[in-house]
Image (cartoon, grey):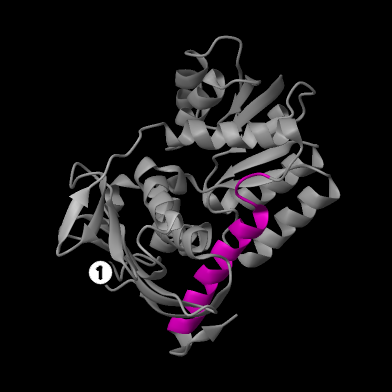
């Protein structure tokens, strides 16, 4: 039985605490959060769990072997290094860090302290995403050629904590949402990316020091291509999902967001789309269960630290391409 501490109780932290408290093979021992009201609301609902205002106090516990890091993006690097140096295995919400250099420092700390490190790219565990990949991998639609992945949504800056509107603190749509799209493309197309060409900026909210818009063209060495586009608008229509084009048909998934749209998967042939069955499961529960299984069996986690680093490498390449007006080669 592995003891677990959840660090950070922002948007996703309370849900991770619930998932850990109900997971097999682990026991939630501690949660850490500076906001006393948030901390109390979670601790009061969990039996036998101790709350801390300082996450390092949770790391000091001998009965904690695993940490789940849900802190703001700019705190990921230091918290992960502290956890590694305390000998704890690390399950860290995306992004792994806000820069490739930060990812490298985390990965090195995990290596030196012989702990397992897994970045949590939860959206690949969404039932519609896994179902779409199953169809693509089956070969029933022939060879995958290209994809278009999009996420258009309102920014609603007044509803966000200040750090989410500061790129230097890990805010902006690239680190909030774009990493999900990049993760999906790398997972489905593979890691052998050849180049990226992109435009990134904040034309919708120029007063906000973080990106709200981007479009990128990704090219793989095997000739496959994809576009990744996102915008956080003042007013518009939400659209969230991807279309994949193969030599013998198409597959698309859509995800309802903010009460808009329908969540499902469709296969396209003969000028019509047919909705397909999508088995349902809890994505956070499945992802954490696979991480625990990797710890118990002593093998590499399903999402590697190298993958988490590559997601940020692609994101940084998008920024460089936008700044220079040139394609960035890997």
| Rendered residue at 53%/50% (across/down) | 94
Position of residue 3 in the picture relative to residue 215 (left or right): right
Q: Is residue 11 above or below residue 209?
A: above
The residue nearer to you, when weighing 76 against 325, is 325
Indicate the position of residue 192 as horizontal and vertical percent values.
58, 72
Labels in figure, total: 1
Indicate the position of residue 93 as horizontal and vertical percent values.
54, 45
Region in magenta: 301-322
Indicate the position of residue 114 as horizontal and vertical percent values.
83, 44
Is residue 326 visible in this depiction of the protein?
Answer: yes
Residue 249 magenta: no
Q: Is residue 223 above or below residue 46?
A: below
Position of residue 43 in the picture relative to residue 89 (left or right): left
Indicate the position of residue 288 as horizontal and vertical percent values.
56, 34
Q: Which residue is mark 1?
A: 204
The residue nearer to you, when weighing 262 against 31, is 262
């Amino acid at each position: 039985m592995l003891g677990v501490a959840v660090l950070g109780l922002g948007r996703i932290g309370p849900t991770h605490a619930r998932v850990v408290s109900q997971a097999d093979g682990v026991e939630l021992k501690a949660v850490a959060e500076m906001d006393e009201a948030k901390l109390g609301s979670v601790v009061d609902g969990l039996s036998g769990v101790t709350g801390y205002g300082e996450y390092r106090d949770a790391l000091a516990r001998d009965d904690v072997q695993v940490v789940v890091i849900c802190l703001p993006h700019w705190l990921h690097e230091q918290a992960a290094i502290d956890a590694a140096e305390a000998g704890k295995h690390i399950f860290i919400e995306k992004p792994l860090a806000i820069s490739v250099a930060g990812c490298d420092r985390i990965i090195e700390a995990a290596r030196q302290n012989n702990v397992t490190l897994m970045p949590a790219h939860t959206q690949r565990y969404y039932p519609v995403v896994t179902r779409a990949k199953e169809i693509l991998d089956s070969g029933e639609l022939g060879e995958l050629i290209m994809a278009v992945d999009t996420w258009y949504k309102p920014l609603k800056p007044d509803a966000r904590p200040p750090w989410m509107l500061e790129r230097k603190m890990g805010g902006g749509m690239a680190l909030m949402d774009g990493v999900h799209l990049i993760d999906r493309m790398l997972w489905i197309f593979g890691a052998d990316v050849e180049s990226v060409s992109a435009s990134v900026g904040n034309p919708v909210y120029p007063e906000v020091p973080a990106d709200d818009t981007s479009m990128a063209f990704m090219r793989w060495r095997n000739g496959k291509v994809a576009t990744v586009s996102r915008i956080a608008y003042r007013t518009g229509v939400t659209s969230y999902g991807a279309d994949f084009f193969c030599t013998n048909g198409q597959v698309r998934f859509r995800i309802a967001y903010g009460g808009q749209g329908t969540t499902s998967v469709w296969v396209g042939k003969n000028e019509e789309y047919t909705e397909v069955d999508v088995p349902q499961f809890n994505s956070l529960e499945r992802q954490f269960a696979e991480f625990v299984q990797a710890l118990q069996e002593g093998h590499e986690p399903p999402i590697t630290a190298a993958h988490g680093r590559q997601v940020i490498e692609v994101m940084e390449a998008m920024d460089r391409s936008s700044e220079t007006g040139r394609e960035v080669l890997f």
